[in-house]
Amino acid sequence: MATYHWVAKKAIPFLKKDPNMGAKKLQRELEEKYQVTIGYSTVWLGRQKAVEHIFGTWVESFGCLFNFKAEVELKMPGSVVEIDVIKHDDGVYFHRFFYCFKPSIDGFLNGCRPYLSTDSTSLNGRWNGHVPSATALDGHNWMFPVAFGFFDGETNENWTWFMRLLQKAIGNPPNLAISSDAAKSIENAVKEVYPWAEHRDCFFHLMNFFVKRFQGPSFGMMYPAARTFQPKYHEYLMNKMYAENAKAQPYLKEFHHPKWMRSQFLEEIKCDHITNNVAEVWNWWVKDIKDLPIAGLADTLRSKFMELYAKRRRIGEKFEGHVMLPIVVGQLNAMSRQLGHLNIKEGEKDEAVTEITATHKIIRHVVNIKNQVCTCREWQVSGKPCQHALALTTTIRNPKMEDYMHHYFSVYHFRLAYCGVIKPLPDKSQWPPVDLPFKVLPPLSKRAVGRQRKNRFPSCLELKGNKPRTKGMWQVQC
């Protein structure tokens, strides 16, 4: 009969290859390979023992973070790694952790737009903590991990501490935008550390709260009001909605005053995202490793960073001979084939483009090719030509798209983002020894009673099963 000690011994090769492997999958693999029947509880206990053998015990892992910090600073000088502890009469307890690798710092500052998406996801292990993160966007619109850490909860103090260390790492980039969900702790931290930055509120989270208080057909205009680039049209839609319910205006000003509409986005940032989807991609990216011991989790995330950067460096090498990223050029080419509803009237310096909508309502925009400006403002905000600008470029013989796109979408900047190398590190037994005058104890916060949830509760705006949401006039996914 198989015991959990036997399972632990046999599970080590499987978990070294795939640390994300759960007990059920491990049970199937062991039964298939060794032709034995093993109970789930036996496999679960054996897996826990194997994880401790590979990554260390839960209690020891917090002290191992100091050895991990020493190894990172040795292999990647310029990285920002900080550990915060709490001293009590009965010992020294782990409190918070932050790290940002030097290649991530350089890649963000040199190759990405000045846009950061912030959020945190809860851990699934013995410590009921959180993993805060700051992620950016490369020219391909792919997630670019910048910084992350560990703390015990989303409080003003913890997020301010995280933001101050983020500022220490990346400095104060001009025209910085920071996007977040509806968490007040992040909003307060941004106000204190980056008061000059453009703070954006995730539209999906905004509407998640909004529809619980206000309903009616006129509130379906919130989505087009958020998506339009034109301040006047945004104001028109909002006034029409306020006429339906006057309480909506003071509610938005009090609880959602960060920018959530494209019409107020800074044109220098070149990012038109109205949701915090980038952070949600990060949360999905780390969801299968959140139950590892804390030092093992930090090293596993570093390994994922290393693989991600190497993979995208190889992708960048394949773009040899291209000036702009091929996917962005392909998107613009696809748009340029759907411009039959636009009529062009040429001027001397500016060109007037007449757009005829499906309702035969005439909307006229003025495009200045030289200055890359359109009165619809999409070109200025996104950094890519809008449909009105594309209507003009299609009349030019052999146009070069790089002349009409911002350099953030160039192959050169994509390569700059990933030119830094996240160094491979040996296992924890080879990390530099650190002589601490104290023993680091696990955090004081206790885990909640019962089995830890791995899946969050879906909001009222999300799909449940295969049944679509019927109320309301739109749906946004985040």
Image (tube, rainbow, N blue to C red):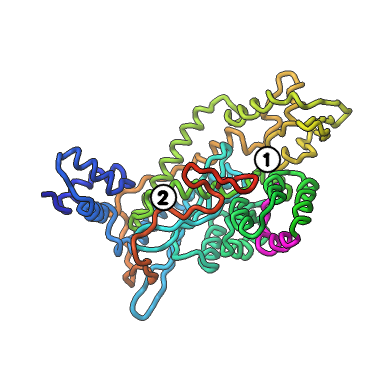
Q: Is residue 81 left or right of residue 245?
A: left
Q: Residues within 10 Å of mark 2 (few under 14, many from 20)?
A: some
Residue under numbered circle 2: 287
> What is the magenta range?
246-262
Label at residue 382: 1
Q: Residue at x 52, y 67 (%)?
A: 155
Q: Does 272 sit above or below residue 45?
A: above
Residue 255's spot in the image, x, y percent?
65, 63
Check disc 2 and give the amino acid type: Lys
In the foreground, 431 or 329? 329
Tally the marks: 2
Q: Is residue 257 magenta?
A: yes
Check disc 1 and give the amino acid type: Ser
Q: Does 211 sit above or below residue 420?
A: below
Residue 247's spot in the image, x, y percent?
73, 62
Label at residue 74: none
Q: Does 357 sit above or below residue 83?
A: above
Q: Residues within 10 Å of mark 1 (few under 14, many from 20)?
A: many
Residue 249's spot in the image, x, y percent?
73, 60
Mark 1–mark 2 distance (CA, rounded to whole Å): 31 Å
Q: Residue furthest right?
A: 348
Q: Residue at x 16, y 45 (%)?
A: 37
Q: Is residue 249 magenta?
A: yes
Residue 137's spot in the image, x, y percent?
56, 44
In the foreground, 313 or 198? 198
Q: Is residue 430 left or right of residue 232?
A: left
- The tag earlier along the polypeptide, 1 or 2, is 2
